[in-house]
């Protein structure tokens, strides 16, 4: 596949079937990968984490027992149609109520998803209907059909730097001043069972041509996907090209002080059998490229370094530049691109 002069991938010459791409994550990081992938193909599936317990999502989760809708809403908005109707609905979905009343802080899209869930009951069907409303050509799927609880082992919170504390809850883990060492996921029924992946998400990973992990909050948005047994097995055994996109800057709290290669070590720790084909990172975000290449090689991956940050906002990926970098990683798979 070639790349046009403006940096965007040239997708005019390709096989009859579009590339099947799956992106796993949550929040703004997942939005970045989705915005890039939709420049490569019309067949994009987002598999979204469902551990959020803060803000509007946390309130709806506690009051209604539903999946936290915030990250699902953001994925829908990222994949919404570029036509006038799709963009209008995307803007409405992202609008938040102000004031001090009962609706204050809720995003309209969160409430729409809550209403659809009460009527349809099946969260996958709810998201499929929301995709129709926003003109999404791909699909948005929850990692699990039920919300999950998260806990982490954290050091650096006591006088003894080696002492380990258990922190519970996605928001608490994301904002901890300590250092996260390991995370665990459980069902919300109090029995500490491992969550079960939605079959549709597992099938999407199995059937994909390319699977993208990251960028995003490493412990609370990216790693949860490899902590769900069926989804982890799908990631390990899929024939898809597996790409890892690293963050541009460490996230305050859960990855403060992490080097780029430490992100890969943590990924390997949580999914020892997972092999990766390529690791993508921004050149300016990698102070010691040789260390990153060595860490990537331990996962079986090549390293691609390029300028993928938005110049006006160094902490955010530029969709066109990231799309070009993803395209470069896929150049080696000539059976997909003609």
Image (cartoon, rainbow, N blue to C red):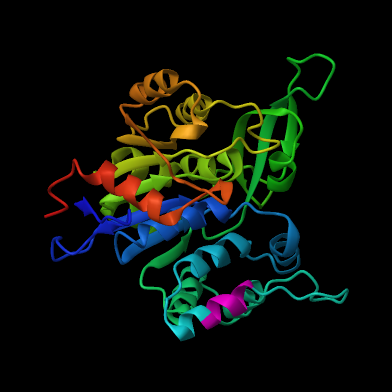
Q: Residue at x 38, y 61 (%)?
A: 45
Where does the image place residue 141, in percent across and percent down from the top left? 46, 62
- In the image, 143 versus 11, the foreground residue is 11
Where does the image place residue 177, in percent across and percent down from the top left? 76, 32
Left or right: where 246 falls relative to 14: right
Q: In the image, is residue 89 part of the stretch drawn in magenta?
A: yes
24 to 182, vertically: above or below: below
240 to 273, vertically: above or below: below
The secondary structure making up most of the magenta span is helix
Residue at the far bottom in the pictured view:
85
Where does the image place residue 239, in percent across and percent down from the top left? 24, 43
Q: Residue at x 31, y 64 (%)?
A: 43
Magenta range is 88-94
Q: In the image, is residue 20 part of the stretch drawn in magenta?
A: no
- Is residue 120 visible in the rendered image? The answer is no
Left or right: where 3 falls relative to 114: left
Q: Residue at x 73, y 65 (%)?
A: 56
């Amino acid at each position: 596949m070639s790349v046009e002069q403006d940096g965007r991938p040239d997708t005019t010459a390709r096989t009859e079937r579009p590339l099947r791409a799956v992106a796993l994550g949550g929040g703004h990081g997942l939005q970045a990968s989705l915005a890039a992938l939709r420049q490569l193909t019309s067949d994009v599936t987002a598999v979204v984490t469902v551990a959020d317990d803060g803000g509007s999502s946390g309130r709806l989760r506690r009051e209604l027992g539903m999946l936290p809708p915030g990250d699902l809403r953001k994925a829908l908005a990222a994949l919404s149609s570029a036509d006038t109707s799709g963009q209008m609905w995307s803007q409405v979905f992202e609008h938040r109520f102000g004031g001090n009343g009962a609706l204050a802080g809720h995003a309209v899209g969160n409430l729409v998803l809550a209403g659809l869930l009460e009527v349809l009951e099946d969260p996958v069907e709810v998201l499929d209907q929301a995709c129709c409303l926003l003109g999404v050509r791909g699909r948005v799927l929850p990692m699990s059909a039920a919300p999950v609880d998260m806990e982490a082992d954290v050091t650096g919170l006591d006088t003894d730097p080696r002492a380990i504390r258990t922190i519970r809850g996605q928001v608490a883990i994301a904002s901890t001043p300590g250092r996260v060492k390991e995370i665990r996921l459980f069902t919300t029924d109090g029995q500490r069972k491992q969550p079960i992946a939605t079959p549709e998400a597992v099938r999407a990973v199995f059937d994909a041509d390319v699977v993208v992990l990251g960028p995003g909050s490493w412990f609370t948005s990216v790693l949860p996907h490899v902590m769900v047994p069926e989804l982890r097995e799908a990631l390990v055994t899929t024939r898809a090209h597996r790409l890892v996109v690293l963050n541009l800057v460490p996230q305050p709290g859960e990855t403060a002080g992490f080097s780029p290669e430490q992100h890969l070590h943590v990924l390997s720790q949580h999914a020892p059998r997972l092999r990766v084909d390529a690791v993508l990172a921004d050149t300016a975000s990698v102070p010691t490229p040789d260390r990153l290449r060595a860490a990537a090689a331990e996962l079986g991956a090549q390293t691609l370094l390029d300028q993928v940050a938005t110049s006006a906002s160094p902490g955010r990926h530029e969709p066109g530049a990231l799309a070009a970098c993803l395209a470069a990683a896929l150049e080696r798979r000539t059976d997909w691109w003609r």
